[in-house]
Image: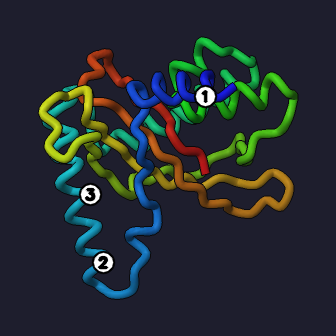
Amino acid sequence: MKKAVKEAERISSKISSPMIVDLFESQGSGILPYLKNSLKTRLALNQTESCFIDFKRSQFPLFAKDRYFEFLEAYNRKDKVDLIRLLSVPLYDIVKASLKDNKPLPFKLYKEMTDAQLVQARLFSQKKMALQSSQTWHQITVKFNFIDPESKKDVVKYNVLERRESDSSEKDWRICKLD
């Protein structure tokens, strides 16, 4: 069992970034944490736009919304090929185990969305000075407003999408965290 876990971690480390953006970094009190987060996000988005020609920051929330609903459809169909294309390896492993054991996911999926908003963007390198594009990840956090079907209230969730700099296929963003 330990050997299988180590092998999965080895494979995952080359496909998914080991870090998820801190969603609560921007929730400090005062203007200084807000400005710091805004500056980091702006710099990361500029870098992302210069790296990926298919990336447009104004259209990314709509893309993230489409990607979420693609995942929802693939999950309902139990389509493992689409799920591996849409999800990071650690998240895919969670979803695959849930499907295999017929257990609910550790997060709730919603079918109605009212809004999607880009909240935060970060760059992450596996090494301090990553010279190879395969070691640099771009992560973007999107705030989704869903409607809970039972209570009919607005539910806010933060989902993270990531892409490695070396990924050459167009719009190859994977969901790496579902809130």
Q: Residues within 10 Å of mark 3 (few under 14, many from 20)?
A: many
What whole-number distance in Å separates the C-alpha atoms at marks 2 and 1? 38 Å
* C-beta proximity under 8 Å, tags 1 and 3: no
What whole-number distance in Å separates the C-alpha atoms at marks 2 and 3? 12 Å
Three-letter amino acid code of the residue under disc 3: Thr
* Res 75 quadrant in image: top right
Foreground: 40 or 101?
101
Specify which label sits upstream in the sequence, 1 or 3. 1
Extreme top residue here? 81
Query: Is disc 1 placed on a helix, strand or loop?
Result: helix
Query: Is disc 3 placed on a helix, strand or loop?
Result: helix
According to the picture, the residue beneath numbered tag 1 turns out to be 5
Foreground: 143 or 151?
143
* C-beta proximity under 8 Å, tags 2 and 1: no
Q: Nearer the viewer, mark 1 or mark 3?
A: 1
Q: Position of residue 110 (x, y in %)?
A: 71, 44
* Res 178 quadrant in image: top right
Q: Position of residue 139 (x, y in %)?
A: 36, 44
Q: Position of residue 166 (x, y in %)?
A: 25, 23
According to the picture, the residue beneath numbered tag 3 turns out to be 41
Horizontal side of residue 130 vs 105, given as left or right: left
Give the total number of marks visible in the rendering: 3
Three-letter amino acid code of the residue under disc 1: Val
Query: Is disc 2 placed on a helix, strand or loop?
Result: helix
Q: What residue is shown at x 67% (from left), y 60% (from top)?
A: 155
According to the picture, the residue beneath numbered tag 2 turns out to be 33
Q: Residues within 10 Å of mark 2 (few under 14, many from 20)?
A: some
* C-beta proximity under 8 Å, tags 2 and 3: no
Horizontal side of residue 179 vs 109, given as left or right: left
- In the displayed structure, 29 sits above or below 68; it is below
Specify which label sits upstream in the sequence, 2 or 3. 2
